[in-house]
Image (cartoon, rainbow, N blue to C red):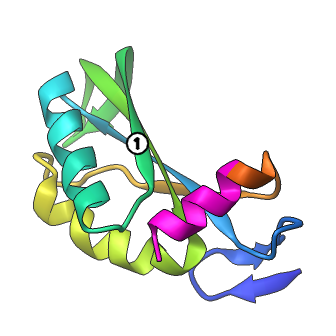
Amino acid sequence: MVRSQLLGPVTFNAFETASVLAVTTVPSMDEGRRIVRALVERRIVACGNVVPGAVSIFRWQGAIEEADEVVVLLKTRADRVRDLTDALPALHPYDVPELIVVPITGGHGPYLDWLSAETG
């Protein structure tokens, strides 16, 4: 196990890469597509899934809000998280975009190899 400044303890998978899954939400499919395309073009993420149908309930500026949203799942390497953290706010329509990063501790070897190569 290695300690990452960004992620804390990170377990490396068998392929000696530290891959992560990052999650954000956006207000529409079009926004999700635009953001994922920009991140893939910059090689910050290998790919992203834009998943419609989420309903978010949250407190914002003292009031409980409810909004239809789209979940965006982004796959990248741990060493690209800083780039993702820097790039996402400029691409995102929200004042405070969600960005949650979860380590991937294993998976299908050829997929993880592809993920690493696409974000290199």
What secondary structure characterizes most of the magenta part?
helix
Classify residue 98 as left or right of residue 117: left
Q: Is residue 66 visible?
A: no
Residue 55 x/y as whole percent = 36, 15
Residue 97 x/y as whole percent = 26, 51
Q: Quick one: SS at disc 1?
A: strand
Which residue is rendered at x = 19% and y = 62% of the image?
A: 89
> Residue under circle 1?
48
Classify residue 84 as left or right of residue 3: left
For the residue pair 38 and 69, the one nearer the viewer reads as 38
- Magenta-drawn segment: 111-120
Which residue is rendered at x = 58% and y = 73% of the image?
A: 78
Which residue is rendered at x = 40% and y = 54% of the image?
A: 99
Classify residue 52 as left or right of residue 37: right
Which residue is rendered at x = 54% and y = 69% of the image?
A: 117
Q: From this viewpoint, which residue is outermost toward the top?
A: 53
How many numbered circles are shown?
1
Classify residue 13 as left or right of residue 40: right
Question: Which amino acid, by three-letter code, is at mark 1?
Answer: Gly
For the residue pair 114 and 68, the one nearer the viewer reads as 114
Membership of 114 in magenta stretch: yes
